Amino acid sequence: MSKPSIILLASITIALGGVCGSALSAQPVGHALQNQPAFNAIAAFETAEGRFAADGRATALYQPAFRATLRGSAESMAREFMAERAAQLGIANSPATLATAYQRNDGGFSVVRFRQMLGGVPVYGSDIAVSVKADGEVIFVSSEARPSIEAIPLQPARDADDVRKQVVQVFGTPSAADVLAPRLMVYADTQPTRLAWVYVIRDAQKAGEWEIVADAGSGEILDYRNTEYYVDGTATVFDPDPLTTATATYGTGGLTDANDADSAGLTAQLISVTLRDITQSAGVYKLEGPWARCQDWAAPSGGVNDCPTPTTPDFSVTRADQKFEGPNVYFLIDKQMRYLNQTLGVTVVPNSVAGGVRFDPHGFNGDDNSSFSSGSDQLQFGEGGVDDAEDADVILHELGHGLHDWITNGGLSQVEGLSEGVGDYFASSYNRSTGHWTPADPQWFWMFHWDGHNQYWGGRVTNWNIGHTYPGNIGSSIHTQGQYWASCNLIAWVAVGRDAMDKAMLLGLAMTSGSSSQKAAAQAIINAAAASGYTASQINGLASAYNTSCGYNVTVPALPDLIFKHGFENP
């Protein structure tokens, strides 16, 4: 059976199937970006009473031995404590005042948080938490109070937009998106006290969500930290699929779907992997990271079909468990996105949302279908036949549509099935790179190794160029036509290698638009490779694939005269 694409007018959905300002500040930003330590992270000494900084002020009081004289609200009793112990906290002579920032009531006690303010402008990082019981006893205090705040003018010399232009360039994130609106704050972590703009941005160049503090006059970056908190987890996954790792065919050795049941053969193909940079929040672990993000928006939803949130970082289950597909997709998308963006150095991230690629591992109401939606930059995977989210070919095919859309800023083309071929190419590129199949195996040329080539549907192939000619004999549907595009580029893959071909594919596609044909894309790719310094041997490999093995008849770009350039100008 075939799996035709779904195309919506408002939001194009590419699917597997049917049934189924001022001068720049000179200061550099370090290459190895690390979170800055908290202001009071290092204690000079610690006693039974609490922790104390080198200047003697308390940064934590374990047993404050204080009870408010007047019973009242938690805030009023906490303020009474602050007034009496201001000297102990190092803020007795500060020009800053205290504003109540937040209050949490937990039955037996309340936590009142204060923030220092200078003339109505908050002091960066100045969190003071006073925990008080209903009878007025203060039972714990934690203080990030800044002790050395100076009175300074509070009118910024430059507006937030002007400073931001400088900041993102110096920080190396020129295409950063703002997560929060810039905030004007007083920065007193170092002397002298400064008025600053504080930005929270996200950019593919530096994975994470970065808070940057910059002088409101000079634009100098004073502080920065990654505000996303990630840990590594573990999971059992198929990589890329159980038939590939077993080098077997469907139906042998217990390697059948059997209505999503486990078998000894399938369980033997599970491997334990690290889930990089998942999120820990509120006592659970989530499949949310800088490159991939599990979300449940499509039916079936909720319950076992929701994204897993275990209380430990171990997501390991067998494939019969509905919680298997989420980690499987997270691992593969995270791995592919890191490879393209970091290893190859090609920035290609979702257009409409900051952060990782959004995916729903259980979508399409359980039907045998999967898709990428350009309007929302979301991927969803169906479950008919073999669960689509168990096969790396399906996952990376749909991600391939996303890559095509993002690298062209929404200018994806389906002329002659171009984007279908892009998806097939990237999926096949990854499968081949795992080293299980060789050119002597029929599976070297297969697409959808686990999801297809079985009783559910026939899958696709990537040697479609054999017996077919461009442009008149490559098929009538976009999926069939896409096989030709994938096949031709995988010939080039053999000639120049995975890294070089994957990079050339992205760089060339970036030059195309929504009406580009296969020939136009091939010309763009070979032009991009030549302009990017590919060797004569690599250009010839591309040319042979495009013009000899396939019929694109591209013009081979003339490489620079390196003998003249380096032999005469730079003897």
Image: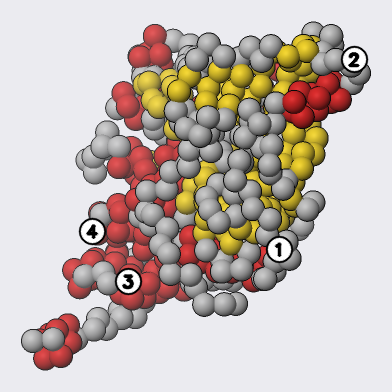
Closer to the chain start, of discs 4 and 3, is 4
> What label does residue 532 carry, if any?
3
Q: CA distance from mark 3 to mark 2?
A: 73 Å
Depth order, front residue of 349/152: 152
> What label does residue 71 carry, if any?
2
Closer to the chain start, of discs 2 and 1, is 2
Q: CA distance from mark 4 to mark 3?
A: 17 Å
Does residue 111 show up? yes
Quarter of the figure with the C terminus: bottom left
> In front of the other: label 4 or label 3?
3
> In front of the other: label 3 or label 2?
2
Q: Is residue 472 above or below residue 184?
A: below
Q: Is residue 62 above or below residue 441?
A: above
Q: CA distance from mark 1 to mark 3?
A: 50 Å
Horizontal and vertical percent position of residue 77:
83, 21
The residue indicated by pointer 1 is: 153
> What label does residue 495 carry, if any?
4
Closer to the chain start, of discs 1 and 3, is 1
Under circle 1, the secondary element is loop
Q: CA distance from mark 2 to mark 1?
A: 39 Å
Horizontal and vertical percent position of residue 333:
48, 40
Q: Quadrant of residue 449?
A: top left
Closer to the chain start, of discs 4 and 2, is 2
Report whether 211 appears left or right of 276. right
Q: CA distance from mark 1 to mark 4?
A: 65 Å
Closer to the chain start, of discs 1 and 4, is 1
Dots 2, 1 in contact, CB < 8 A: no
